Amino acid sequence: MTDVDMLNAGRRRFFRFLAGSLVLTPAARALAEQLATSPPASLASVAEALQVMDFEEAARRTLPPAHWGYLATGADDGLTIQANVEGFKRIGLKPRHLVDVSKAETNIEIFGQPWETPLFICPVGGQRAFHRDGELATARAARTKRHAMILSSVSTYSVEDVAKALGHPPWQQLYMPLKWDDTENIVKRIEDAGCSVLVWTIDLLGGRNTPTQTRFARQDTRNCLACHPHGGGTPIYRPMYDGLDGRVNPSDANWATFDRLKSLTKMKVVLKGIDNAEDAQLAVRHGADGLIVSNHGGRSMETLRATVDCLPEVVSAVKGRVPVLMDGGVRHGADIYKALALGARGVGIGRPYLWGLSAYGQEGVERVLEILRAEFTLTLRQMGTPAIKDISAARLARI
Ligand SMILES: Cc1cc2nc3c(=O)[nH]c(=O)nc-3n(C[C@H](O)[C@H](O)[C@H](O)COP(=O)(O)O)c2cc1C
């Protein structure tokens, strides 16, 4: 019996107990009975998952409401999350036929590093909220399945520990500390850990509103203070900020701040959260080594455009001078294909691997990566473009 099975069995026993309790109203007893008899998990095993979305419900049933709320939330009504996913659905595919597709080549190169596929793992903070092994489980899955990983600076395991689990230093994301001295310290630590790429996230400098997260937290009947001594929602582990002030995302940051950051390190510096041509041009002018077209998975602002719709203008502004990666709403191998056809060098996932992590730990992340890689390879072949170099926007059509 896995931990998840035990958790579900315990939950069913609890609701059955409530259903039999005379202290509750008949309506509450009926609800408890319904919850006690609802299927324990949407997947009986990790192998049962056929598509990435199969993991979403499994994760929702596994996680306590407050942690599910942290994972699922977007800004405001979640319209940007929806836009990211829907954006891919409006792009159709125009395959070519009678092309030799017996061999598919998925490998790419970025900053001189060979990647076996363009699919990478996005930085996500607080992963012990999803599984006790958190970022270590994600890193082990990335290692086993040979995918690139970007580690969040608000991780629950340190870059040093994750580098061991991954087998090499990850790319490291940064939420910039408010104090410049702390920025210098954290950047030095990341460099000392051997990371070659620093990814500065710039799409949360003005704050955000995440009501879905708050609503789920209110539904959670557990005593948050039992685990979070500083209050529910306050991170328990943030090893990358140990010894630092801990506050991040200076709202007065500007391009001069970027210049300062750039001059602080020999690492490549990539900007995450670019979604328009003007900023892309400025970024290249200021020496950014790469860009990630992203809107934080719809968690930064409401009614932003789908990232896949922002991609062409960023790619055209950059004119091939630096690599452009993207994330947001990727749920199928065909989505990876579409993003590459629009000029992305690499394509990232956030929630999909978190669903796998939440429901099944390392094994769940591995299965998510496996499914997406298999779907992507299938798309390459079926499109009559068996190598990544064969992909172009000519194979896409608005539908
Ligand atoms: C729960 C959660 C936490 C996240 N934490 C971070 C973070 O610490 N740093 C960061 O740059 N992006 C963070 N992101 C955004 C992801 O890196 C990525 O941009 C986004 O999840 C991609 O969209 P998707 O979830 O639709 O795949 C987070 C996303 C989620 C869902």
Image (cartoon, grey):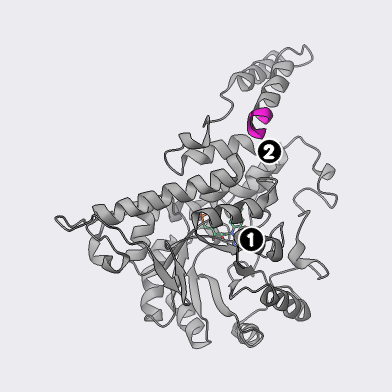
Mark positioned earlier in the residue sequence (1 or 2) = 2
Disc on res. 382: none
- Left or right for 184, reference 286: right
Q: Residues within 10 Å of mark 1 (few under 14, many from 20)?
A: some
Q: Position of residue 223 (x, y in %)?
A: 81, 39
* 38 displayed left or right of 99: right
Instruction: Measure the C-alpha gap from mark 1 to mark 2.
Output: 23 Å
The kind of residue tagged 2 is Pro
Picture coordinates of residue 245, whole percent (x, y): 81, 70
Q: Which residue is mark 2?
A: 64
Q: Residue at x 60, y 66 (%)?
A: 168
Residue 387: quadrant of the picture: bottom left
Q: Is residue 66 left or right of residue 59?
A: right
Badge nearest the viewer, 1 or 2: 2
Identify the magenta region: 1-7
2 in the magenta segment: yes
Query: Mark 1 highlights which residue?
Result: 208
